[in-house]
Amino acid sequence: MRALKVIALLSINWLASCSSAKYAGPWTLCIVDATGHATCGPATVRLANRKIQRWDQVYLINYTIALDSVSGLVRPRNTHYGSLLVDHDGSLTVQVALANDSTAWEADGGNLSAEGLQTRADTIGGDWYQSCYQGCPAHGRLTLVRSR
């Protein structure tokens, strides 16, 4: 009987760990600008070991695309990192960092933000905008497609 309890607890913990890393793994990140030009490349998403503000889950994104080809960006930098944020209601936000340092959650670093993203099968997508106080005009579509 004790062995069954241990197996049941291990199974519950394993299921919890699988669901908590739901978005971890290899993806393809595509950023389409307002002109329709697509910039795509591989991205790796991994669960971070911390919470930030209101987000229930924080994932770090490492990608290998050149953002300087995205039309209209103010201060484009090829930082190669960002975040996937999961709110308590399950809604998703992706931030692609354009800041000078490794802070992927800078409020006004000119980062690309995509909020209220839609999920379908192995695809996450929605509209992005560049967040900056001076009013950045850049916008477009962002998609993450899970690699197989």
Image: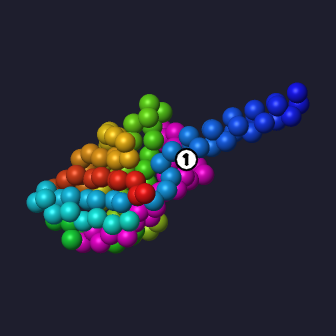
Q: Count how many numbered circles sit on residues in the image.
A: 1
Q: Position of residue 106 (x, y in %)?
A: 40, 56
* Left or right of residue 20: residue 136: left
Any part of residue 52 in sight: no
Coloring basis for residues: rainbow
- Amino acid type assigned to the residue bearing label 1 in the image: Ala
Question: Residue furthest toward the top?
Answer: 1
Q: Is residue 64 magenta?
A: yes
Mark 1, other Cα within 10 Å: few <14 / some 14–19 / many ≥20: some
Question: Residue furthest toward the left?
Answer: 35
Residue 64 picture quarter: bottom left
Please, what secondary structure does the residue beneath circle 1 have? loop
Q: Residue at x 56, y 40 (%)?
A: 19
Q: Residue at x 40, y 53 (%)?
A: 146
Which portion, as a residue range, is magenta?
43-68
* Left or right of residue 38: residue 47: right
Would you name the residue on which mark 1 appears? 21
Quadrant in which the C terminus appears: bottom left
* Left or right of residue 60: residue 15: right
Q: Residue at x 89, y 30 (%)?
A: 2
Q: Position of residue 117 (x, y in %)?
A: 32, 42
Q: Position of residue 32 (x, y in %)?
A: 21, 58
Q: Does residue 32 lie above or below 8 as drawn?
A: below
Q: Is residue 56 magenta?
A: yes
